[in-house]
Amino acid sequence: MTKGTEIPRADGLRAGPFTVSAVGAEGVDLSSVDASGFASNLLGQRPDQGGPSTVNELSIAVLAIAEDTAKLRLFPAE
């Protein structure tokens, strides 16, 4: 994924939609504003951070970052 990529809402997991707002050596930034207007940000997400970040019932893991492209894995939280 690159800056500007939109990740659709995961309805069953009560998360999103997300926009990739930055990708670089510092990590991946994701931002979200839901239908009620609630805003959330995941900043500086990196492959070496020790595990995925979780928003409601959705986990987001950064698998790799190469220049301005990131590979993410989105999956149900355990």
Image (spheres, rainbow, N blue to C red):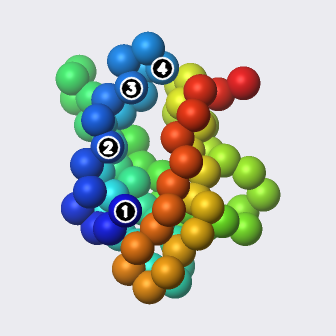
Mark pair 2, 1: CA separation? 9 Å
Mark pair 3, 2: CA separation? 9 Å
**Relative to residue 14, is residue 46 drawn left or right?**
right
Q: Is residue 49 above or below residue 10?
A: below
Q: Earlier in the sequence, mark 1 or mark 4?
A: 1
Amino acid marked by disc 2: Ile
**Relative to residue 72, is residue 8 drawn left or right?**
left
| Residue 66 numbered mark, or none | none
Q: How many marks?
A: 4
Residue placed under numbered mark 4 in the picture: 13
CB under 8 Å between discs 4 and 2: no
What SS does tag 1 mark?
Answer: loop
Q: Is residue 62 above or below residue 32?
A: below
In this rendered view, identify the residue nearer to me: 12 or 29: 12
What SS does tag 4 mark?
Answer: helix
CB under 8 Å between discs 2 and 1: yes
Amino acid marked by disc 3: Ala
In this rendered view, identify the residue nearer to me: 39 or 54: 54
Residue placed under numbered mark 1 in the picture: 1
- Whether residue 54 is visible, yes or no, is yes
State which mark lies toward you, 1 or 4: 1
| Residue 10 numbered mark, or none | 3
CB under 8 Å between discs 4 and 3: yes
User: On the rendered image, what quadrant is the C terminus found in?
Assistant: top right
- Whether residue 38 is visible, yes or no, is no
CB under 8 Å between discs 1 and 3: no
Q: For mark 3, does the 10 Å Cα neighbourhood hold few (<14), some (14 to 19), or many (20 or more) residues?
A: some
User: On the rendered image, what quadrant is the N terminus found in?
Assistant: bottom left
Mark pair 1, 3: CA separation? 17 Å
